[in-house]
Image (tube, rainbow, N blue to C red):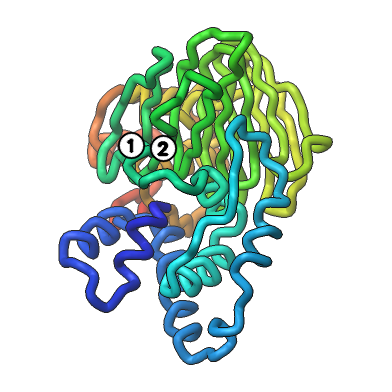
Amino acid sequence: MNFKLLSRTLDPAASKEDKEKLNRWSGRNSSRRSELEKISALWEESARCQTFEGIDTEADWSKVQQIGIAFEMRHKVIPIRKVLIRVAAVVLFAAGLSFALFMVFKPSGKNPSYYLSFESLGQVKSTQLPDGSVVTLNKNSSLWYSHDFDVKSRDVILQGEAYFEAEHNPKLPFRVYSGNSVVEVTGTSFSICEDTAFVRVLVLSGSVSFQLADNPEIATIVSKDESGFIFRDNTLEKQQQVNLNNISWKTGQLVFHKTPVGSALQDIAHHFSMELSVEASLNDSLTAQFTGQSLEDILEELQLITSLSIHQTDNVIVVKP
């Protein structure tokens, strides 16, 4: 989530442009809409609380600094405007460590323009970082990095989903902070997805170090053709396989080989940012490949293959006998 945008839109004087940007971000994604509704409700509730006036922001900020993220830059307390106190309280509750990561990434004394943000909004976008690394963001995702990136560090913060092709530099590791996780590499290609339930890394070449952001002891090495998951309860899991359909948003390809129909439908729904409603028994498997086809064409083909009734209703793929 773009917390700068969120803090602006929670202000009663928010501009129409900012509100439209936030609506595009939530789009048809039910989890994002739900998160936004919770944050808005918490914001309204916080307005009726009187305890914010007595908050010791410097003491609370010291606690945030104890998260222990090893950035190469030095930090000190940043004065927080009164309105941002409520934003911090709301967002930290709703989004957990992601907001803390964003705040820690902001050394004091620097103008906001010192930092660069790259946002994809409603489309897939790519950018080349100063070190030559290439980042491709999925829809409604954001990336932050400093102007002196590739000087003392190669640290970035990701909100959403992205595919990275990191340039090799063993002297200056490339680090991605996402949710409650840190991925560190010297140079390789991999994807990261920050979901509501987990952060997932898929490694396409080389290997990465995958660890909990505030507890380096919870860590593992994820190598080529392996997947790693850090869940919201801070548990870690590694799988000796990758599902390439998880990056179909970048490749444009959905490939199934004797794949259970239920799993295939989940991949298709994810690819098109849709929800899935299944009201039938799914016992068949699917072998097929779709490249750049529309959702309508794919669903028509699936109906012929499976004899199921599969159709789209608003942002939901509905499956019936």
Q: Residue at x 48, y 74 (%)?
A: 86
Q: Residue at x 52, y 66 (%)?
A: 88
Residue 303 visible in this rendered orientation of the protein: no
Q: Position of residue 58 (x, y in %)?
A: 62, 65
Task: Please name whichever residue, 313 or 116, is drawn nearer the observer in this view of the structure.
Answer: 116
195 lies left or right of 65: left
207 lies left or right of 314: right
Q: Position of residue 146 (x, y in %)?
A: 43, 33
The reply to whether dot 1 and dot 2 touch (C-beta < 8 Å) is: yes
Q: Residue at x 51, y 27 (%)?
A: 191
Other residues around mark 1 within 10 Å, as few (<14) / some (14–19) / many (≥20): some
Q: Position of residue 28 (x, y in %)?
A: 32, 56
Task: Please name whichever residue, 200 or 50, is drawn nearer the observer in this view of the structure.
Answer: 50
- Give residue 143's mark: 2
User: How many circles with numbers are drawn on the protein?
Assistant: 2
| Residue corresponding to mark 1 | 118
Amino acid type, residue under disc 1 in the picture: Phe
The disc, 1 or 2, on the residue closer to the chain's N-terminal end is 1
